[in-house]
Image: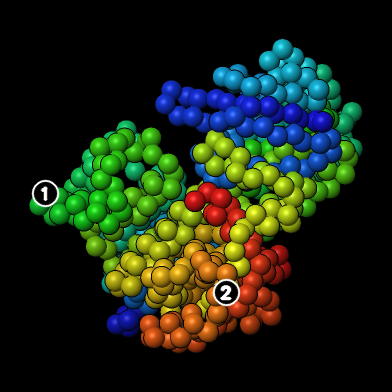
Amino acid sequence: MSITVHNLSKSYKKVNALNKVSFEVKKGELFGLIGPDGAGKTTLFRLLTTLLIADQGTATVAGWDVVNDYKAIRRSVGYMPGRFSLYQDLTVEENLNFFATIFGTTLEENYDFIKDIYIQIEPFKKRRAGALSGGMKQKLALCCALIHKPKVLFLDEPTTGVDPVSRKEFWEMLKRLQKSGITILVSTPYMDEAALCDRIALIQDGKILQMDTPKAITKHFPKTIYNVRAHNTYLLIQSLKAFKYQYSVYPFGEFVHYADQRNDFETSELYNYLEAQQLNEITIEKTNATIEDTFMELAK
Amino acid sequence: MKSDNIIEVENLTKIFGDFTAVNAITFTVKKGEIFGFLGANGAGKTTAMKMLIGISKPSSGKAIVAGFDVFSQTEDIKKNIGYMSQKFALYDDLTVKENITFFGGIYGLSKKQITEKRQQLVKELGLESIVNTLVGSLPLGWKQKISFSVSLLHEPKIVFLDEPTGGVDPITRRQFWEMIYQASNRGTTIFVTTHYMDEAEYCDRVSIMVDGKMEALDTPKKLKQQFEVDTMNDVFLKLARG
């Protein structure tokens, strides 16, 4: 096991940030923590990177205990915090050399390890970090987190606020990086990114709601879901919510996801009801639950 | 200005030094429309939005927002629009009630109007138990919902929302969009940016900016037909990746 977490809890004054969280991450695994702001993701990262001490519970990273062996952990993990935290007034190259020196290595020594990412920012190596675009800052931060060839990489919301194109590129980069054997723990509020992990944990209010592979996790949704569409989405949502047998109603892109309380539900009944609500161009089709459906069901 | 347009933009351009951030964009937004304003980071969205809300002077072109000119009538624009950003929403060290009173005052509402609006808002959002809570201790989703309501206090004709749902949990994200639908249903125009492509589907029309230019503008349905793909995410990837 690359990471083991057992009953980990942490509170700040009144707020219970993490509440008896347990999970394990295998060596070489890409493990995703999926949850919104305030779920406890960052607290968990800080505990595992030895920047905070838990109130209760134990954890190991790369075989080391997070309290007793904190120095060994700091040498063998890479951490990219959610907030850009490199030196803005050092250049790209200076930042990299600085982090390499701290870890007793050089850019040359581990060049091959970060090459895939570094070549994308190398043309700007004389530019100050503060003057880089968002996407380039992110790549530099990743290079700095990898410069000492860590065994475990922690990425705290690397793609928050990043556009879909850059997000896709970032994940392609992670998948290539994973092939080198490194263990990656990554957090994100984007449910579509969850599908790219080997396993995921859905987390909210300091608790793990469910843990599984992205494919299997949707099996935890207990009902059949229907894609419903009509000419007026707002009226459709209002009407579905007012339907007495509704189990859940959530807008999903161009459709509204509808689940019924009953197992012997007939779509024709819903169709007639919606028609009576003055809705036109109605379509109702069975669809599969997504990770986001599952999350909302478990978070209810 | 055509009577059913609330925004008319023609060849609007902003140049910083030798960099053209916004390159001659032209479009209109209808009254009551939910208008999605998409683009990659650095495509020029924020710069364009700043010009439209009257806090950045365009280099050239024309734009009328809520009946006022972005060159000469910026103060009138500010009074007639609402604005909410992801980064700055409310004052963390004021309570919910104090924030509403403060922003109501800024927007020039009378004490009586502020009290009425506050009571209405508390009732609609179910804020009874947290009205005297410091905003800083509320979950992000709550902050964003209150912030949106505050941006509507002075009943603006149009409200600009800059990534209002970033990092918000999926349920609250949907509640937020129901509030948007509701405001739009009451006749308020919504101008919104987002990185969630499922949210692009909720808009009446969507524009996509690439390198300072507006490369696409249509209903989500027609954009998907035009680019021969099934989702807005694919439309976005096709356009922005070239």
Label disc, if present, on residue B111 of the rendered structure: 1
Kindly indicate the quadrant of the structure image that contains residue B138.
top left
Q: What distance separates the C-alpha of mark 1 from that of mark 2? A: 56 Å
In this rendering, position of residue A156 left or right of residue B8: right
Kindly indicate the quadrant of the structure image that contains residue B189.
bottom left
Residue at 45 percent across and 29 percent down: it is A15
Q: Amino acid at mark 1?
A: Lys
Q: Nearer the viewer, residue B168 or A213?
A: A213
Q: Is residue B58 visible?
A: no
Q: Position of residue A117 (x, y in %)?
A: 79, 44
Look at the image and tell me in which quarter the C terminus of chain B lies.
bottom right
Q: Is residue A45 visible?
A: yes
Label disc, if present, on residue A264 of the rendered structure: 2
Kindly indicate the quadrant of the structure image that contains residue B65.
bottom left
Residue B104 in the image: above or below residue B14:
above
Q: Residues within 10 Å of mark 2 (few under 14, many from 20)?
A: few
Task: Assign a secondary structure to mark 2.
Answer: loop
Residue at 56 percent across and 19 percent down: it is A55
Q: Position of residue B51 (x, y in %)?
A: 41, 60
Q: Amino acid at mark 2?
A: Asp
Residue B171 in the image: above or below residue A148:
below
Look at the image and tell me in which quarter the N terminus of chain B lies.
bottom left
**Mark 1 or 2: the one toward you:** 2
